Image: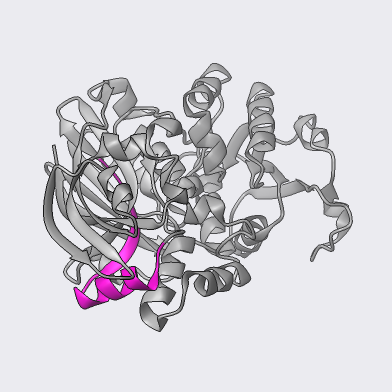
Amino acid sequence: MTTRQKLRIGLFGYGVVGQGLHDVLNSSCGFKADIIRICVKDPAKKRRIPMEHFTFNRHDILNDDSINLVVELINDPDAAYEIVTEAMKRGKHVVSANKTMIANHFRELVELQSEHNVSFLYEASAGASIPIIRNLEEYYDNELLHSLRGILNGSTNYILTKMHNENIPFSQALNEAIELGFAEKDPSLDVDGFDAKFKLCIITGHAYGLFLDPEEVFHYGIRNISKFDIRYAKEKGFKIKLVPYVGKTNENTITSYVLPRFISPDKYLYNVDYEYNGIITEAAFADKQFFSGKGAGGHATGSAVLSDISALSYGYRYEYKKYQQGTVTNYTRDFRVEIYLRYKNESDKELFNFEEISEQYHSNTCNYVIGVVNLSRLYELRKQLPNMDLFIINTGRKDIN
């Protein structure tokens, strides 16, 4: 029988997720882990537990040799990077939920944990309560994975569900998400698609063994969605979801992107609503599999962090098996996708260089076109798109090599 290591935890951050972890950890029976000290930034903020548990100096944790695990749950990716790298260099294991920090320093962090012989776990950074990373590591380690797609951001899914079900504008749905704690007061990471892209980059490392620079991956969020887009989707029997995708284009090459997508009632993701996430894998032997769970909220994410802590107590660490195999070596954006484009100015439509057009609509107030474009062209337009009076949706009908 494997002996569980006694863990003494230094916790960074006591916001929604930090408090969620504190709750689920205190509710877990027979678990050998104690939070020794909690480091927070604001000394004036009222806390729900006695102040004697807190420190405002990171070195009170990092310099404490009795603390063997650092759990990093703060928002600032730069500060998180400094904390995580220093902790590993000091021989401490690390659990993190900071997808921005991990995605932007992925290869370096993987190499650092190996160099210092520590474990670095981050399940909560990708699928919140869905254990997708460990499934990719253990279940799909020798599986020929064709593709992975899903809903990875509970905040945007909540907003899109409210707009679809209640016919309310984007701004109102966003404010409700912020009030409920599903979105930050500055929701840019969520609604502009960055959060979903960072998670996709992390998942790609485990699914295919490529450590992608997030700057190389095209993403487009939901900020410019209108009631017209929602109405069109409903008339066609669709829902709109923000869906990251990664998949093979040939034996050793993959592509990936983040786009809103039409979802029909016969698809798994159609009934994944509000703050829930859903992930679909398609593989050569296991065929299609579907995972679903809460994608926002302190207890949902806290449970994933707790799962990492529990695994670490048994000495678990990621092996990056697909990276070791080295089967996938190339990344491409030369990939054709069918999109719905709602636009106002004809000159904007022409920028997309449509290769095929199957449907067009013109009116005094709004126009749309459905046709095939190249992902590389979308990537070239990526900095202009957020400021243009238009909205893009992947039809889901044609992903064409």
Q: Is residue 392 magenta?
A: no
Above or below: residue 340 compared with residue 85: below
Q: By what rule are the colours in the image chosen?
A: one colour
Q: Is residue 237 visible?
A: yes
* Nearest to the observer: residue 307 or residue 30: 307
Nearer to us in this view, 243 or 80: 243
Looking at the picture, tell me which residue is in the foreground, 305 or 221.
221
The residue sitting at 39% across, 31% down in the picture is 216
Indicate left or right for 401 with 307 as reference: left
| Residue 149 pos. (x, y %) | 28, 50
Image position, residue 320 (x, y; %): 37, 29
Q: Would you say residue 229 sits in the magenta stretch?
A: yes
Q: Quadrant of the N terminus?
A: top left
Question: Splitting the image into 4 quarters, where does residue 394 fall?
Answer: bottom left
Please give left or right for residue 141 compared with residue 283 in the image. Answer: right
Q: Quadrant of residue 401?
A: top left
Can I make out residue 304 in this image?
Answer: no
Q: Is residue 378 left or right of residue 95?
A: left
User: For the magenta stretch, what is the residue range?
Assistant: 225-246
> Hey, which residue is sitting farthest bottom in the picture?
166
Q: Residue furthest top?
A: 115
> x, y (%) of residue 168?
45, 79
Q: Is residue 344 left or right of residue 370?
A: right
Viewer-proximal residue among 93 and 202: 202
- Residue pictured at 61% horizontal, 59% vertical: 184
Q: Position of residue 114 (x, y in %)?
A: 51, 21
Q: Residue at x 29, y 42 (%)?
A: 351
